[in-house]
Amino acid sequence: MDDMNKTEETPNNPSRRNFIKGVIAAGATVSSASYLFRTNAAGQTQTASAPGSVERLISLSVNGQERRVDVMKQETLAQTLRYKLGLTGTKLGCDRAECGACTVLIDDVPHYACSVLTHTVRTKKIVTIEGLASPEGTLHPVQQGVVDEQGFQCAFCMPGFVMSAVGYLKTNPNPTREQLAHGVSGNLCRCQDYDKILTALMKGAENLRSA
């Protein structure tokens, strides 16, 4: 009974809990400081990263602009574009390189952004659907073709189709309908309105040739 009524004495030495909390706080401080000072001021020599490590604060060339962004090593380009840079025209559909909704141009070649790690394109030129129109707001000829022919229903897949078509037309500016169908065959439409889509993209190709 006496043991139950005893008041727990407060030790003079730090408790185990406070000690652990102090270690965690110190570790977080050191980690944050090392992260902040990785990017040195201009003219200073930057310390080389440890082998196998990945820098998180990187520069990306997106739609003609250099963008600084904090990127995790496992982050995909689609995630970075949508959630870090606010470029939501790049859609996430299947998220496993099957539907093509996330297609962007990397050095003028169409790629599924959901299957490209952001760190691998640090030296590349990235163009999304937002970067096709001119700074004055004039639509790209392929975009205009889509408007002219009203080629999509829900249009969720439209950015991917347009980016694939733009990339393909760089290699074959005067395709037949069958050739263009093959060129965008990596893109899927959940509304299954492929005939209208091809008509719109062919109109876009025509617009591009006469631009």
Image (cartoon, grey):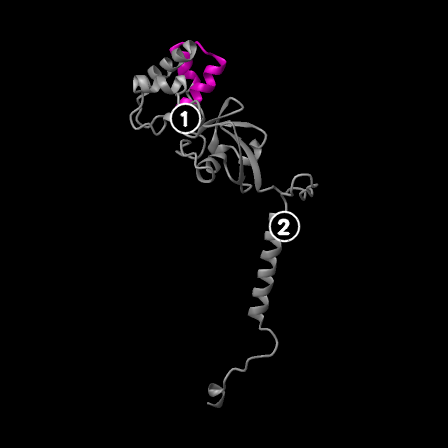
Q: Position of residue 40 (x, y in %)?
A: 65, 43
From the image, tell me which residue sits under label 2.
34
Name the outermost residue toward the front.
Answer: 136
The amino acid at mark 2 is Ser
Q: Position of residue 27 (x, y in %)?
A: 61, 58
Relative horizontal placement of residue 62, taking residue 204 as reference (left or right): right
Q: Identify the residue at horizontal 57%, vertical 33% (top origin).
A: 120
The amino acid at mark 1 is Gly
Q: Position of residue 92 (x, y in %)?
A: 41, 34
Determine if residue 175 is in view.
Answer: no
Q: Identify the residue at horizontal 41%, vertical 26% (top origin).
A: 160
Q: Identify the residue at horizontal 52%, vertical 82% (top origin).
A: 8
Q: Position of residue 156 (x, y in %)?
A: 34, 30
Q: Which residues are magenta?
A: 161-183
From the image, tell me which residue sits under label 1.
160
- Please tell me whether residue 116 is drawn above or below residue 167 in the rendered image: below
Q: Identify the residue at horizontal 44%, vertical 24% (top origin).
A: 135
Q: Residues within 10 Å of mark 1 (few under 14, many from 20)?
A: many
Q: Residues within 10 Å of mark 2 (few under 14, many from 20)?
A: few
Q: Pick the residue in front: 147 or 186.
A: 147
- What is the distance, in whole Å, between disc 2 and disc 1 at their CAs? 39 Å
Magenta span: helix, strand or loop, mainly?
helix
